[in-house]
Amino acid sequence: MLEIIDTHCHIDNAKFKEDRQEVLNHCQKLGVTRIVTPAVNRSGWNHLLSLCDSTKGLYPALGLHPMFCNDHSHNDINELETYLDKHKVIAIGEIGLDYYIKGFDKEDQAYYFEKQLGLAEKFQLPVILHVRKAHDPVIQLLRRFNLCGGIVHAYSGSKEQAEQYIKMDFKLGFGGVLTYPQSTRIHRLAKELPLSSIVLETDAPDMPVMDHKGERNSPEYIIDSLNALAQIREMAIENIAEITTLNAQDIFGEMKQVILHD
Ligand SMILES: [Zn+2]
């Protein structure tokens, strides 16, 4: 039986409101037994935590996403510290820099990112990074902190930048993009990078796989990305599943969940 970890899925998103439990039941049947759920803003933390607390296989990460920097306030950083003191989370995320979308102040983004890296260092938690068109400044910032690694979600940088992340104990997340034949640059990365540095993710409800283009993405579809990666690496699906699952555990630990309500 395959055992797969979706290392990045916004299952707390309102788009799963109607059928979340059905989706998760189907995931269990497919072997997608563990799902890491990163936060995007302060107002979502309580819902995310209670959902993860009451649902088997869901693991929370808390943080302030760079694309929502216009919603964040400086006090959210103090609040994050309080939450990290009180709650058991698997990582800080998702955090980072996004220079792709215009209109988000770079200094603002850097403020929240640096403060959260400081908390990751203090609490010795891995980080889940969102980085677009900003890998070099992110790599420079990461070097200033004593971190215990993390995941660069939806990796889109160069091979050289990937190697620098790997040196800092980071893994690179790949998802639905693997299923599009025209994504040749990402395919090449997924083929050439050491398999020990690759983890699978969906980013659901965003970034759908090819067969569900234009629809809501779902953690169920991580199987499509698994199949695509197996094909790219010319390896058996079972081996890819096993290795990427171990890679995720390298970052997040054993992921043994305390189930409060089963
Ligand atoms: Zn995300």
Image (spheres, rainbow, N blue to C red):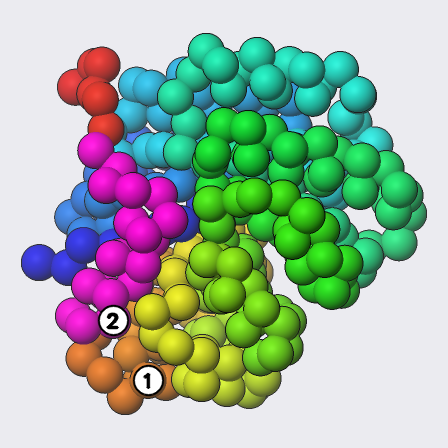
- Examine the image and state in which quarter residue 185 appears: bottom right
Q: What is the crowding at mark 2: few (fewer than 14 residues within 10 Å), some, or many (at least 20)?
A: many
Q: Quadrant of the C terminus?
A: top left
Q: Earlier in the sequence, mark 2 or mark 1?
A: 1
Q: Is residue 58 above or below residue 47?
A: below
Identify which residue is drawn at 37% across, 85% down: 232
Q: Given the image, on which type of amino acid does mark 2 rest?
A: Ile
Q: Are the residues tagged 2 and 1 within 8 Å (C-beta)?
A: yes
Identify which residue is drawn at 30% across, 74% down: 227
- Examine the image and state in which quarter residue 63 appears: top right
Label annotation for residue 240: 2
Please give left or right for residue 191 compared with residue 220 in the image: right
Instruction: Kindly state the secondary structure of the residue where label 1 is placed.
Output: helix
Q: Is residue 125 visible?
A: yes
Expressed as whole percent of the image width and height from the top left, the position of residue 161 reads 62, 72
CB at mark 2 closer than 8 A to ligand 1?
Answer: no
Q: Is residue 144 above or below residue 89?
A: below
Q: Quadrant of the N terminus?
A: bottom left
Instruction: Kindly state the secondary structure of the residue where label 2 is placed.
Output: helix
| Magenta region, residue range | 238-256
Q: Is residue 17 visible?
A: no
Q: Given the image, on which type of amino acid does mark 1 rest?
A: Arg
Please give left or right for residue 227 compared with residue 12 in the image: left
Q: Which residue is nearer to you in this view: 160 or 101?
A: 160
Q: Is residue 199 above or below residue 220?
A: below
Label annotation for residue 233: 1
Real-space Cα distance between discs 2 and 1?
A: 9 Å
Q: Which residue is nearer to you in this view: 147 or 37?
A: 147
